[in-house]
Amino acid sequence: MRRITGKAKDETLIELQNATESQTGSDGPAVLTAFRINLHSDENGGNSVSALSERATLPGQAETEKLQPNKDTVFFRDGVRRIDYVLSYVDDKDGEKKQEWRREFEANLEKQGLELETEDKSDSKDQKTYFLKIHAPWDVLTTYADILKIKVPFKLNDIPRGHDVPLEWLSHPFRLPEHIMLPQPDYFTYPFDKNKTDFFLISDKDTFFPPSTRNRIVYYILARCPYNKEVRKEKDKTGIKRLLSNGTYTAAFPLHDCQYWKRARNAECESERYNLYEHWARFLCFYKEQPLNLIRKYYGEKIGIYFAWLGFYTEMLFLAAVMGVICFTYGVLSYEDNRSSKEICDPEIGGSIVMCPLCDKKCPFWKLNSTCFSSWQSHLFDNEGTVFFAIFMGIWVTLFLEFWKRRQARLEYEWDLVDFEEEQQQLQIRPEFEIRCTDKRLNKITQEMEPYLPTTSKCVRFCLSSATVIFWISLIVACIIGVIAYRLAVYAAFASIIKDPLRKIQVVGRFITPQLATSVTASCINFVIIMILNFFYERVAVWITDMEIPKTHLEYENRLTMKMFLFQFVNYYSSCFYVAFFKGKFVGYPGDYSYMFGKLRNEECDPGGCLIELTTQLVIVMAGKQLWGNIQEALLPLMRNWWSRRKGRHHLENHSSRWEQDHRLLNFSQLGLFYEYLEMVIQFGFITLFVASFPLAPLLALFNNILEIRVDSWKFTTQFRRPVASKARNIGAWQEILNAVAILSVVTNAFIMAFTSDMIPRMVFLYAYGKDASMTGYVNNSLSIYNIYQIPAVSMPEERVNWFDNTTSTCRYRDYRYPPGHPREYNHTMQFWHILAAKMTFIIIMEHVVFVVKFFVAWMIPDVPSVVKARFKRERYLIQEYLHNYEVEKVKIQMSASFITEQSSEISSMTDKQEVLSECL
């Protein structure tokens, strides 16, 4: 194959003509197919290049411009061969070594059968970038389709689709046009076999393999093609990844089929990118269904599965959000029935109760009614409806996971992934593993020599990797301890801002207590620390995973997934776990407080309870993460586009070539989808693990995900280069992580309701200690008494104002202990043990009830719908029958051909005998 460069027009025409003439005579049917338009366009034997040039010429152009091909195209200059991949590079002044690598790499690509065409740097806008266009001819495609066992159609699917659903007309406003939802007919498929080409539905060899399959095959070749001479044995000099990392090439990518805001000029281009933008990526389509089949056809099954999962997750969030709003509304409407808050706000009750100082030295005595607003806030989230919502979310998680399995099974059938073997795609050995592992051993299954990593090396790498992960998790724990120390130290500063202990608790502003101010600032600091640690650990996780040299792509992704999620789990949730299960639980009492580091007194919960602080922590971290993520994903690319317009680059896109336009786009890395999953799974943890403290969390997640779907689709369609299509039958290791989070969420919500919420103490008082089955007197009952004169000097306020006028000698604190003067003073009362027993009983009952319901629901809902099972069995039967008939017909043809051959040989022998006899006569 002669490579074509973009220099003079005459040279180009001569090269094209020579290539056509020489390849037509030597390469046989494959080349005849590639150039059939040229050969049939001029019956009189005229110049085939002229006819070929006219193919890409727009009407109305001058005759001299007809020789100039349209650059906004996905074809070679001949207008016939499709561009399957593009490489770009820049000539360095001292890049002789890189030039040699490029020459060897491109020569090896040509030996593999790929066809190349180079665009000179003089034709690019920056006058310094070369573009190498790659085309895979039919022979190459069929060879590697056979190797990769790519499934291709052999018969139109004649199984009728499902029946119409009742009231289907209600969903019409949310539906997309039929040609968008079903961009291609439904076929029965079978792994491609190069020796059975007549078995498959090959009507046009140019379009038989879709562009997504073509670029996947070319990338497979690029990833394994060496860039050294055959005489040298340098295993590390292999693959496009290394050439990109060492700067030999600056980019490698398949082309989008058109500009996203208008259709392609060439009628043979599918303009699928335009359809995706018009019906999917625009935010005004937020209420429409997603064109999953078109996404799968354009980007591949792996990206299609991600958007299918994200869309289904968002749909299921709608039910959880509705229930959360109902629970929150109940808290708002039951304001007037909140007897505890009324007693706290009552000047005669809460105004007469003097509370003990909340910190040493700086904090004064304070009146209980100063926490009136805080108690009302707490009631919004800490009410009877919260228990119901916590149980509901435990069941909702199961429904979500089970129904997703069914949706996933349906997609596996519709996208032809049922028989997809991981060994074909995901379990292919990574080129990095082949390059770095020089030792080989016999594979017992394939009986072939394959590279492997020695056990000693594997153990050393595993130990180093584990030590690195433990170090970073320890660093997170150290940061959390630092934030706790900040909480303990800064509380006294907030408490001493206002020096008016007579009237109200020390406040910052009108409604913000020192506890709330401390919690908010500590949460913000914690969020900043989380983002900083994320920035570093993401790179560390990739580095240690590369160091382990996983054998397969699936193994690589699974290892990285577990490392990243373990880190993110500790990073994002540790502060929430502290507030939910540790804060306020180990405080002690006024005469015997517990101290951290021997100096910092352990902090108590907000006067309204610990649940409102957990709500504050959850809202800040969850909302902050979602806001920051949306800024990174949407605003930064928008600013980049605005800056491009300022520099005039957007205007140049109308005059640039298709490869130059895509070259300016962002590269979609191999781990791009990984971070999208990670973001959503972390959000899933927020709305399940701690949802009992904030019923509106699913609503925030729903709004975020509606935006997330459109932002991600907009990025894929307009901001990223077209990624290499890859297959996946499920969401991989994320499924197991979701299952683990779902089980853990039942435990955490049960403990939150028992130990963080005040629900159990209120219920125990109502049914065991209250008068006339009412909550009257609950506030007084929940506060213990301490003698002010027994407070140690280290805990007594610095400014001892005679504010109590000798009218009281006691203060109150949150606990259940005997009063001073009792034989067991300051020891826990029996009510404390009753409440503790009730809490443990509630945890056991709630966990068992939810788990029993979860397992029952999981058992009742089969993973694969019966309709899909039946259709799959029917398809299997038809495929076997069709294959059997094909083989029988093939044998018949062979037998008839051999019979005709034998007859012809007998006739010829008889003729020979007659000729000999006649000569003798």
Image (cartoon, rainbow, N blue to C red):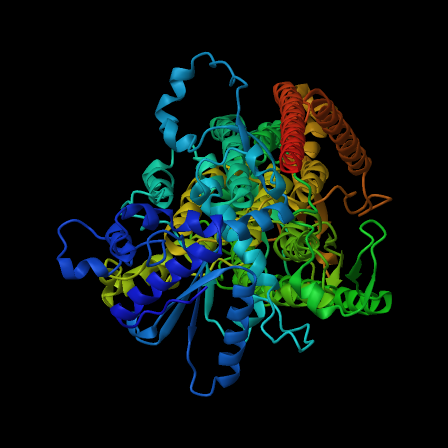
Q: Quadrant of the C terminus?
A: top right
* Residue sitting at the far front: 921
Count of marks placed on residues: 0
Q: Is residue 58 above or below residue 907?
A: below
Quick one: 115 or 134, which is closer to the camera? 115
Quick one: 632 or 216, which is closer to the camera? 216
* Residue sitting at the far top: 166
Quick one: 879 or 722, which is closer to the camera? 879
Q: Position of residue 45 (x, y in %)?
A: 28, 52
Quick one: 908 or 60, which is closer to the camera? 908
Residue that appears at 73% across and 65% down: 548
Q: Is residue 283 above or below residue 804?
A: above
Quarter residue 234 falls in: bottom right
Task: Say whether residue 348 is left or right of residue 465.
Answer: left
Q: Position of residue 774 (x, y in %)?
A: 64, 23
Residue that appears at 29% across and 74% down: 122
Residue 777 in view, yes or no = no
Q: Is residue 722 above or below residue 838?
A: below
Residue that appears at 35% across and 28% down: 177
Quarter residue 316 falls in: top right
Residue 275 in view, yes or no = yes
Q: Position of residue 286 (x, y in %)?
A: 38, 37
Q: Position of residue 376 (x, y in %)?
A: 51, 38
Task: Say whether residue 704 is left or right of residue 786.
Answer: left
Q: Is residue 717 above or below residue 769?
A: below
